[in-house]
Image: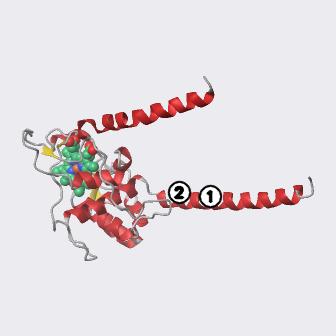
C-alpha cells in the first residue's frame, strides 16, 4: 500500500470515529456545558477586575460556608485590584488559629494578608459530616479540574431544575442539568438578591454565577494574562525575526544565480 492510501484510510477512520467518541463523552448526560462569553476568552482576553471583585464577594458570602480555597492567600487578592489597606481589612474580618504560644497553647487571632483564605471546616471529614456525607471540594483549582472550566461552574450554578418525570431523587440530592449524571449533593446555593453588589450591578443568580465563575477561573489560573502577553510578544518576535532573516538571505544570495 502506498503511503497516501494509508494516510487517507487513517483520516477516514478518525472522521468515522468522531461521532462515536462524542457519543461516549456525552453518555450519562454529560453534555459539554454551553459556552458563555468571557472577557478572558481568546489570545488577547483579560479578566474583568470588577467582575473578579464581585465574584470574590459571592465566594466569601455564599460558597465559603462550605468550600475552602486553601491555595489562595488574602494578599493574592491584590490581583483583583484591591489596595493593601482593603486586603488588610478583609483579612482582619476572619479569625484564624495560630500558635502554639509560649504556654504551648493554640490561640485565635485576626487573619493577616499572608494567611490563606479561612476554611469553613477544620478538615475534610468535618466538611463531609456537615454535608450529608458529600464532600464540598476545595475550589482553588476547580476551574482547571472540571472539563469546561468557567462554563462548567456557571452551568452547575444555573443548572438546577425539577427532575424529569420518572426520575427519583433521594433526600439531600438535587437534579442539575450540567452535573455529570445529573445528581448533585450541593443544594442550589444562589438566589436572586442574596449578595448586594457595591457597584450597583443587579444581583441575579445569573450574574452571581457569571462573576463567581470568573473569580474561580482567576484562582485556577492567576497568571493567564501574563502567559497570553508573553505568547503574543514571542509571536511578534518570531514574525519580525523571520522577515529580517528573509531580507538578509535575499541580500547575501542575491548575486548567486
Ligand atoms: C451548603 C453547602 C454548599 C454551599 C453553600 C456551596 N456548595 Fe458547592 N458543593 C457542596 C457539596 C456538598 C458539593 C459536592 C456535590 C456532590 O459531590 O454531589 C459541592 C460541589 C460543588 C462543585 C463541584 C461539582 C462537581 O463537578 O463535582 C462546584 C463547582 C461547586 N460546588 C461550586 C460552588 C460555588 C461556586 C458555590 C457558591 C456560589 C457553592 N458551591 C456553594 C456544598 C456547597
Q: Where residue 21 sits: x, y (%)? A: 36, 35
The image shows residue 111, relative to residue 27, as above or below, that is below
Neighbour tally class for label 2: few under 14, some 14-19, many 20 plus, Cα within 10 Å: few
Judged from the image, the secondary structure of the residue bearing numbered disc 1 is: helix
Which quadrant is home to the N terminus?
A: top right
Task: Say whether residue 115 is visible.
Answer: no
Residue 241 in the figure: left or right of residue 78: right
Can you tell which mark lies on residue 227? 2
Residue depicted at x 24% and y 51% = 156
> In the rendered structure, which disc, 2 or 1, sits on the residue that comes first in sequence?
2
Q: What's the image's color scheme?
A: secondary structure
Neighbour tally class for label 1: few under 14, some 14-19, many 20 plus, Cα within 10 Å: few
User: Label 2 vs label 1: CA separation?
Assistant: 12 Å
Judged from the image, the secondary structure of the residue bearing numbered disc 2 is: helix
Residue 241 in the figure: left or right of residue 137: right
Q: Where residue 63 sits: x, y (%)? A: 23, 55
Residue 176 in the figure: left or right of residue 152: left
2 and 1 marks in contact (CB < 8 Å) = no
Residue 135 in the figure: left or right of residue 4: left
Q: Which residue is mark 1?
A: 235
153 or 87: nearer the viewer: 153
Q: Is mark 2 within 8 Å of ligand 1?
A: no
The image shows residue 2, relative to residue 163, as above or below, that is above
Amino acid at each position: 500500500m502506498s503511503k497516501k492510501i494509508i494516510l487517507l484510510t487513517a483520516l477516514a477512520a478518525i472522521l468515522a470515529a468522531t461521532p462515536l467518541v462524542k457519543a461516549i463523552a456525552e453518555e450519562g448526560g454529560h453534555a459539554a456545558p454551553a459556552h458563555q462569553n468571557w472577557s478572558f476568552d481568546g489570545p488577547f482576553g483579560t479578566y474583568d477586575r470588577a467582575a473578579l471583585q464581585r465574584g470574590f464577594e459571592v465566594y466569601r458570602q455564599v460558597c465559603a460556608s462550605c468550600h475552602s480555597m486553601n491555595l489562595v492567600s488574602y494578599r493574592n487578592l491584590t490581583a483583583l485590584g484591591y489596595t493593601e489597606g482593603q486586603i488588610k481589612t478583609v483579612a482582619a474580618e476572619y479569625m484564624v488559629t495560630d500558635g502554639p504560644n509560649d504556654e504551648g497553647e493554640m490561640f485565635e487571632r485576626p487573619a493577616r494578608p499572608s494567611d490563606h483564605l479561612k476554611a469553613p471546616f477544620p478538615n475534610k471529614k468535618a466538611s463531609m459530616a456537615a454535608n450529608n456525607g458529600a464532600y464540598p471540594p476545595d475550589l482553588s483549582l476547580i476551574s482547571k479540574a472540571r472539563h469546561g472550566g468557567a462554563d462548567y461552574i456557571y452551568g452547575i450554578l444555573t443548572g438546577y431544575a425539577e427532575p424529569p418525570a420518572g426520575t427519583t431523587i433521594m433526600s439531600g440530592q438535587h437534579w442539575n442539568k450540567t452535573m455529570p449524571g445529573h445528581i448533585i449533593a450541593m443544594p442550589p446555593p444562589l438566589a436572586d438578591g442574596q449578595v448586594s453588589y457595591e457597584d450597583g450591578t443587579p444581583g441575579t443568580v445569573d450574574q452571581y454565577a457569571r462573576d463567581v465563575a470568573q473569580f474561580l477561573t482567576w484562582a485556577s489560573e492567576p497568571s493567564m494574562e501574563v502567559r497570553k502577553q508573553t505568547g503574543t510578544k514571542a509571536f511578534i518576535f518570531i514574525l519580525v525575526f523571520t522577515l529580517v532573516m528573509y531580507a538578509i538571505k535575499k541580500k547575501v544570495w542575491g548575486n548567486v544565480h
